[in-house]
Amino acid sequence: MTAALTDDTARFLQYLAVERRYSPGTLRNYAHALETLARFAESLTLANWDELRGEQLQTLVADEHRRGLEPPSLRAMLSAYRSFFRFLARDGKLRNNPAAGVRTPKVRRKLPEVLDVDEAAALVEVDADDPLALRDRALLELLYSSGLRVSELCGVRWRDLDVDEGLLRVTGKGNKTRIVPVGRMALSALAALHAAQPAGADEPVLPGRGGHALTPGAVRAAIKRRARQQGVWKRVYPHLLRHSCASHLLESSGNLRAVQELLGHADIGTTQIYTHLDFQHLAKVYDAAHPRAKRR
């Protein structure tokens, strides 16, 4: 592989880390995608990225699909390539984006799993009779109340919480900040946690070892442990509470824009998946209640 190709990918990853402030996990995904692209470019004996053509890139996508890469992963890979080529174009190293017309196989969108309302209540209503239980009750209530991503939850500090207004400032994907509501039960759990473990404004709301903020892995482990203790036998994980929050809110309100704002989705199309869940709920109610739909 030529030094020029290697230098370009290294500069792009540095740009994502320093200027875009991408998370370590996202950077690893981009690095893996670029390694695949670089090996492909080497097999074509390309001297620079401007020699790469769209039909060649389409071949790479087809090859990866045949090797077993699923459509969502192919889409993520191609998205990384488009970003990389836009970066090169801004530097004047590329005249045309070879990924512009490349297609990936269609994704069969899976509906997200959710807890029903009773399951969600059973999960979050932890008997808060010791410091760890107080923390876990607050963790679960906040995830379900505000539909947070696990990374957002781990980043919350006490200064981000406005108790009087019932609002929380969180930092989501792309370092974007948004304000989300916090429900009465979550505020109560947070107040009980703070009363038992007083903390300064800059300290994490959910402390782990040594007073440092909980890691996403620690949050997942805590939720899994509490689910077993609370008698919820579904596979429970942080994003399940986010899905459940969105689905239950949409079922009750029908306000898709509000749910989009709560979740911090840039594209309302991402939020629309919850309308399918809502229609499933409607179908179940119809089948159970309508006199011409009931099974004999």
Image (cartoon, rainbow, N blue to C red):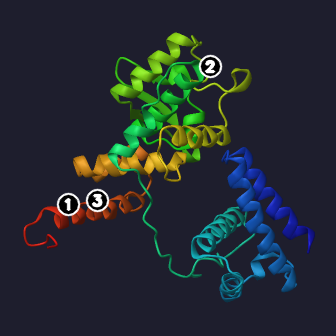
Counting from the top left corner in percent of width and height, residue 211 is at: 69, 21
Q: Considering the numbered disc 1 on the image, is that residue within a helix, a strand or a loop?
A: helix
Badge 2 crowding class, 10 Å Cα cut-off, few under 14, some 14 to 19, many 20 or more, is some
Q: Which residue is mark 3?
A: 278
Q: Is residue 253 visible?
A: yes
The type of residue carrying mark 1 is Val
Residue at which label 2 appears: 203
Quadrant of residue 4 within the rendered picture: bottom right
- Quote the CA–CA distance across marks 2 and 1: 45 Å
Quickly name the residue at label 1. 285
Position in image of residue 55 (x %, y %): 66, 89
Pick the residue in front: 246 or 31. Answer: 246
Q: CA distance from mark 3 to mark 1?
A: 11 Å
How far apart, in angstroms, are the residues tagged by discs 3 and 2? 38 Å
Measured as percent of width and height from the top left, residue 285 is found at: 20, 60
Q: Which mark is residue 169?
A: none
- The residue drawn where x is 41% and y is 54% is 114
Residue ID at (59%, 26%): 206
Residue at image position (53%, 53%) is 235
The amino acid pointed to by label 3 is: Asp
Residue farthest toward the left in the current orientation of the protein:
291
- Quadrant, the N terminus: bottom right
In the rendered structure, which amino acid carries the disc numbered 2? Answer: Glu
Give the crowd class for mark 1: few <14, some 14-19, many >=20 residues within 10 Å: few
